[in-house]
Amino acid sequence: MDKVTGLRVSVDVGCYQHSVAVGLADGTLLDEFELAHDPTGFDEFFERIERHCQQHGSAVSVAMEGYNGWARPLDTLVRTRGYRLFNINNLKLARFKEIFPAAAKTDRIDARRGLELFQLREQIPTARGVLQEVQGVPLENEKLKRLTRRRRTLVEERSRVIARLQADLQAVCPSLLAITKDADNLWFLNLLSHGQDLEKLARLREKTILGIPAIGRKFGARIIAWQQGARFGHDVDWVGPMIVEDACRILQLRRAIKAIEASCKELMATSRIATLIDTIPGFATICSSELAGEIGTLDRFERESSLAMYVGMANLSNDSGKVKSSKNPKHINSHAKGAMMAAVDKHRKLVPESKRYYDKKRAEGKKHNQAIRALGRHLCRVIFAMLNHDRPYEFRE
């Protein structure tokens, strides 16, 4: 582990302003001030830091909580200046404060506590876990992270709108919903969004129906058969427009999701992490892009167990006396875990060796998700080795 030398800066992050403490490696406190979260405040922050640098002629290390959160864009500006940036892990900080409590709790005291963590991290493992250096991430992986998180948000929104659409259709015209097994079908959504009046669908001519995109003769026949006995509820006058609006929104979301997936496929070709993970059967474009974006760089992880913990494939020991148990860790990346769970489930269906391992875990009494995580834990070792040695996945029959 590299020692932190030179000028040390601790920032206690708030919504509108931040508390800053500046000190040296020997514990000397040089400066304390409040920083407004605006461009003027950022300029003042860097001016004061540079002033101290001129006096002490040393490199700068900055510790702040909320990396990629409330600290944005200050965290990005810090890295742009070439300073070393350390993220204060809030969960581990809470544990550290339980062991080493302070006399009081104020923003200024918390800022000073960051300087103390710099001094203690070389001697105390607990303090070392609180301060985690932020490594540089390739630009393509940063883009993949943004794109895949945006895609996940849109997919979740689409699921909510589809559920609402189906509930409204079931109440207003259940026979219309019955002509399709899935309300998310393109032809069905095009039918619902054909006009603003839902009742007019029962009076459309065959030529008009067949002219709607994605509706061929097979689905056209279903619609014509429904028209013969079409019935609507009394609330169709005000619920009908809502159904049409939801159908249009789902179509918009489908197009947006498809565009993001196309961008991910194009971008992942430039990401070494995504390209290597994509060689694992079952991981495919989306899961590989998500993992590349969330992992960012392998330099963040000292060993494969750290990677497994980060993506939610490893448990923490919870042993007590003669009782042997484990518990799920809280400080994981939920986006990476979701991608791993989906990818590993597909992977075990494609690779016989992985399928045997999964079946073995199920035979031991583990539930489906537990068996998937066990297989995912093994794949984390594989992924770490692949990325560390820059080698693609090797398939064995």
Image (spheres, rainbow, N blue to C red):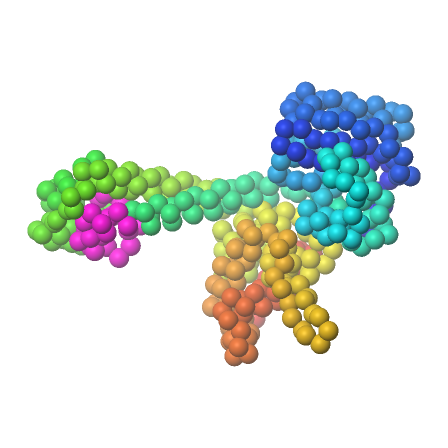
Apparent side of residue 117 relative to residue 78 in the rendered image (left or right): right
**Image height of 137 relative to 314, above or below:** above
Quarter of the image where one finds residue 85? top right
Q: In the image, residue 7 lies at what x, y percent?
A: 84, 34
The residue drawn where x is 26% and y is 42% is: 243
Frontmost residue, 371 versus 384: 371
Left or right: 243, with 292 as reference point: left
Q: Quadrant of the C terminus?
A: bottom right
Residue drawn at x 75%, y 46% as measured from the top left: 131
Residue reaching furthest to the top: 40
Residue at the extreme bottom of the image, as rendered? 363
360 vs 351: above or below: below
Q: Residue at x 22, y 37 (%)?
A: 238
Q: Which residues are magenta?
A: 166-193
Q: Is residue 173 left or right of residue 106?
A: left
Q: Quick check: is 215 in the magenta stretch? A: no
Residue 40 percent across, percent down from the top left:
68, 20
Image-quadrant location for residue 208: top left
**Viewer can see residue 212:** no
Task: Give the total of numbered labels.
Answer: 0
Q: Is residue 150 left or right of residue 224?
A: right
Magenta portion: prevailing SS class: helix
Taking the view exactly as shown, the residue that stands out farthest to the left is: 228
Q: Residue at x 51, y 75 (%)?
A: 362
Snapshot quadrant of residue 54: top right
